[in-house]
Image (cartoon, helix red, strand yellow):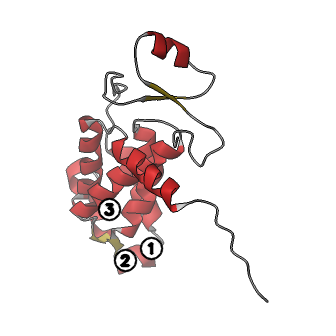
Amino acid sequence: PKTHVRQVVSLDVIEKSRSIVDRIHLDDRLGRYIVDLVQATRDPASVGLGELAPYLQYGASPRASIWLALTSRANAFMEHRGYVTPADVKAIAPAVLRHRSLTTYDAEAEGVTSDDWVARVLDTVPVLRTLPVPSRSRKGPQYVHQGSLAPEFAARGRQVQLCNPRLVHPCLL
């Protein structure tokens, strides 16, 4: 049977989405948290998880830090935020770290999965408790959801671009 595939998003929307993801704010301290998570997969004893060392053949490479930062930004984008939170990092970390690490035969024999040790790392590596919301003084338009504070921003002389909730992401105008 013939299968008809319908286009659901244009290349232009994908390019605009990527551009927005690249501009999503990632606080330097949260970037350090990402590096700490990846480092903990290579040296679990450094964060008090020495008992995990026999289960990890290879920890995540430095490239995992890059991908974890990018996918955290993408997660924030999907949540309609212009900044990354620790919850974004924790939401995507299992997929990134599981893909970029290798467990040992002993781990498999004892039923210790990648998800198990990644969860332990996420529970152990401390997250900064206070991360500031990025300043609204950035150059460029401030993306404001319809029905929100757009008139207030405009009254303060800020360039405002209203979001359209019918698009793949509300800020793709």
Report, in whole angstroms, how far the alpha carbon at label 3 lies from the one at label 2: 11 Å
Report, in whole angstroms, how far the alpha carbon at label 3 lies from the one at label 1: 12 Å
Q: Is residue 136 left or right of residue 160?
A: left
Closer to the chain start, of discs 3 and 1, is 3
The residue closer to the viewer here, 102 or 171, is: 171
The image shows residue 93 at horizontal and vertical percentages of 41, 54
Q: Which residue is mark 3?
A: 52
Q: Residue at x 25, y 48 (%)?
A: 36
Q: Residue at x 46, y 68 (%)?
A: 113
The image shows residue 49 at horizontal and vertical percentages of 29, 54
Quadrant of the rendered image containing residue 166: top right
Closer to the chain start, of discs 3 and 2, is 3
Do tag 1 and tag 2 residues touch (Cβ < 8 Å)?
yes
Amino acid bearing label 3? Leu
Amino acid bearing label 1? Glu
Q: Is residue 172 above or below residue 45?
A: above
Residue occupying the far right of the picture: 1
Q: Which residue is mark 1?
A: 110
The residue closer to the viewer here, 159 or 44, is: 159
Which quadrant is the N terminus positioned in? bottom right
Q: Residue at x 69, y 74 (%)?
A: 5
